[in-house]
Image (cartoon, rainbow, N blue to C red):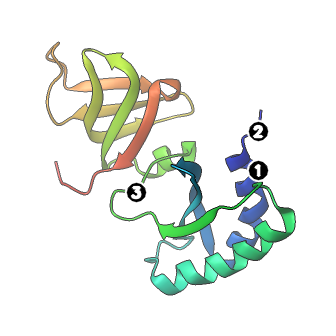
Amino acid sequence: MTTIEQKIEELLLPSLTEMGYSMVRVKLFKTGKNTTLQLMIEHSDGASINLDDCEKVSREVSVLLDVSDPIKGHYNLEVSSAGLDRPIVKLDDYKRFVGNPVIVKTYVSKFGCKVFEGSLDYADDHIIKLTLKKPLKTGDHTVELSYNEISSARLNDISL
């Protein structure tokens, strides 16, 4: 089943790619009575995102969203950079950031822990492997997690 976030990403991605950007994450969320559509972007060439980039993307995607109207009712559009604590969302992100410090959260406790901080040492189509900053209760310094166990992951700008 395709989510609304996936539909929005499919709609916007061709224009963003043409403009030289890639989509890090599309997130639709409610805070109280307000609905926000958050688009997190980065330059395809790895250059830093600035306010002008966010404004440029906002203007472009606003037109596309107005025409296709994928979100019923009023919502706020928020375009931002991924920042230093960049979320790791897609399979290609995990592979791209092998060797970097990360914080990974799981849906349920594994080895008595739901938050794993360490170095992302390996990523394939099914699992990731981390070398942990602090050992598990078992004494192990490494952990292997499948993607369906991961609730969220992000780069950790604090060096190990």
Q: Which residue is drawn at 26% across and 26% down?
A: 142
Front tag of 3 and 1: 1
Question: How many angstroms separate mark 2 from mark 3 (CA)?
Answer: 24 Å
Q: How crowded is mark 1: few (under 14 residues within 10 Å), some or many (20 or more)?
A: few
Disc assigned to residue 7: 1
Whether residue 18 appears in this view of the structure is no
Residue 2 got which mark?
2
Q: Marks 2/1: CA distance?
A: 7 Å
- Of residues 71 and 139, which is closer to you in this image? 71
Taking the spot 15% from the left edge, 15% from the top edge, the residue there is 137
Specify the amino acid type for callout 3. Answer: Arg
Residue 129 occupies quadrant: top left
Residues at circles 2 and 3 in contact by the CB criterion of under 8 Å: no
Determine whether 153 is above or below 129 in the image.
Answer: below
What is the three-letter code of the residue carrying label 2? Thr
Q: Which of marks 2 and 1 is nearer the N terminus?
A: 2
- The image position of residue 158, as x and y in percent, is 19, 55
> Tag 3's secondary structure?
loop
Please name the residue that numbered disc 3 is placed on.
86
Asked whether the residues under the numbered discs 2 and 1 touch, taking CB atoms below 8 Å apart as contact, a structural biologist would say: yes
Residue 139, position as x, y percentages in the image: 13, 17
Tell me if 146 is positioned left or right of 117 in this view: right
Residue 151 appears in view = yes
Between disc 3 and disc 1, whose residue precedes? Answer: 1
Q: In this view, does 44 lie above or below 99?
A: below
Within 10 Å of disc 2 (Cα), the crowding (few <14, some 14-19, many 20+) is: few
| Residue situated furthest front in the rendering | 33
Q: Number of marks in the image?
A: 3
Q: In which quarter of the image is residue 119?
A: top left
